[in-house]
Image: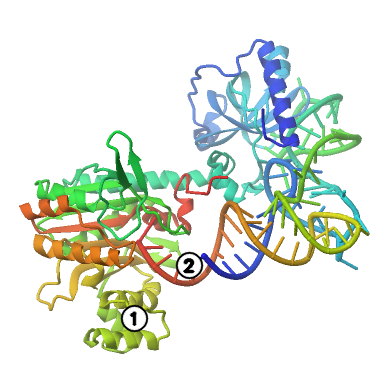
Amino acid sequence: MSQDHRSLQQIIDFRLQKLARIRAAGYDPYPYKFDADTRVASIHKAGDDMVGSRVSIAGRLVSLRKMGKASFAHIQDKSGKQQVYIKRDDVGVDLYNNLFKNLDIGDIIGVRGDIFRTKTGELTVHVEDLILLAKSIRPLPNLKEKDGQAFNEFDDKELRYRQRHLDFITNPEVKIIFRQRAAIIRSVLNFFDTREFVEVETPALQPIYGGASARPFITYHNTLEQKLYLRIADELYLKRLIIGGFEKVYELAKNFRNEGMDRNHNPEYTSLEFYEAYRDLFDMMELTEKLFKTAAAVIGKNKFDFAGNTINLAAAFERKSMFELLDEKTGETIEKMSVQQLLEYVKSLKLEVSPKMNYGQLLDKLFGELIEPDLVQPTFVYDYPKAISPLAKVKRNSDGTLVERFELFIGGMEFANSFSELTDPIDQRQRLEAQAKLRELGDEEAQVVDENFLQALEVGMPQTGGVGVGVDRLVMLLTEQNSIKDVILFPALRQL
RNA sequence: GACCCAGUAGCUCAGUCGGUAGAGCAGCGGCCUUUUAAGCCGUUGGUCGCAGGUUCGAUUCCUGCCUGGGUCACCA
């Protein structure tokens, strides 16, 4: 019946016996409802004002000190832990012996009673009535703590991610991160709602994927009898909405990328994309900066310990062109270099290059190696090479090698990516066809030609500023977590 | 993908210079009516991640694999 090892099975068997005894004594171990009238945190908050008042509380039994005919226990609800005191003579022999004595740490109970202070000064519920709300038959990891210091902490990362429920029960402070995540996301939605953006939902299952350079997950629809891809970006659908006249749209949704995973990457991740018609890159910088500052306000501070640095979100974000940064760092005039000269230069720095790399890829390489890691404080970097930005408008008043694109870097990591969206349908078609050629040459991440998108673009699209933000990373920054796994409830892990 | 580290009882860990394992907590039995990492007495529980190799003998040494963590490479 069970693959559990004997010592664990033994514990489960004992608990099953207790469950049977509880039932035999006429107590329902899984009843239907309980009306608690108090969250335990409010008891401590009120302090002496609560002494003498009657409360009913519900939660999980997390510690148990039996002393014969009287016992102390702590129960934990979503707000915190509360000590309760239960005495045989107060609750009756039947309840004490047949129900209470068969309880285990991990059970969920409700109690009613008056608040008093113990000899040692702890506010405690003097139990008059106790009801079992759920019998736990599988043991929890050890829960021991004194004065806020935990002992035998449940800290095996793998087990914590695989069995998140145990993580939250035994390390309740972890829940704070996810409450903050929810608040951050709420503030993002609110940010756009108050600016009259429309929240939309576009397909996650797409016959053709696009809008980013990445390898997709592939799936199959039985009735349609066709391959579908899980989206790697919302971009192309959102642009169709702009063409359709929505003018301001945003979507907060999951993207799926069939690529490597590490502390900054989960195969499914939450992305925010927003598009505003008649706007350009620089408008989007302003909007993005406001967005980040608004989200930070939710946490109630503006300096964040992140990736080994203190990030100041209160100051104005830096704005620098890619060449400005490169020239500052290298002392060269990178912009003047030909492809060949650039290749030689990158080689001379002993960076890994292949002769196949185009101008854009070389610049990107140089930038990624020399500049990115140093972009600690929030910095918008603009002027990207056209070759690596097939969806962005060519830079105004330029020779056409650069596009209007920015990325926002914080703590050496990319947080946002934005374009003055390419609206010229002929240029767009050529650029996607160029990408398709790269694919044929073996670049699995190159983009594919989406004829439906191109035809929509041919109908005419207003100039538009568009931005994509990595929401998990935003949450990492604001909750000061160094691994994306710590801001995702159920991060991807290999199935055992 | 490469390299490094880790995997021993339900949890946290020790240990075996090669002779098939210990502790604390949890569990179980007993005592205990204001305890709080409750306490005291007794006690169950392990194919030492998996598979091969070397050896009289492997949990320990070697190799491969699995899982996770970290660093690097690429991507958000």
Q: Which residue lies furthest to the left in this view?
A: A459
Residue A218 shown left or right of residue A125 in the figure? left
Q: Nearer the viewer, residue A189 or A465?
A: A465
Q: Residue placed at 71% from the left, 35% from the top?
A: A8
Residue A371 shown left or right of residue A454 in the figure? right
Q: Residue placed at 44% from the left, 63% from the top?
A: A306
Q: In this view, does A103 lie above or below A313?
A: above
Examine the rendering and report whether any part of residue A123 can be seen.
Answer: yes
Give the chain letter at badge 1.
A
Tell me the quarter of the picture where residue A280 sits: bottom left
Is label 2 in contact with label 1 (beta carbons under 8 Å)?
no
> Which residue in the protein does label 2 denote?
A308
Q: Nearer the N terminus, badge 2 or badge 1?
A: 2
Residue A480 shown left or right of residue A73 in the figure? left
Q: In this view, does A447 lie above or below A65?
A: below
Q: Residue A162 placed where, x, y %?
A: 55, 44
Residue A430 shown left or right of residue A329 in the figure? left
Examine the rendering and report whether any part of residue A313 can be seen.
Answer: no
Quarter the N terminus of chain A occupies: top right
**Mark 2 burial class by Cα count in 10 Å: few <14, some 14-19, many 20+:** few
Q: How many numbered marks appear?
A: 2
Q: Distance between the residues labelled 2 and 1?
A: 36 Å
Q: Element under label 1?
A: loop
Q: Residue placed at 18% from the left, 48% from the top?
A: A249
> Which residue in the protein does label 1 denote?
A355
* Nearer mark to the viewer, of 2 and 1: 1
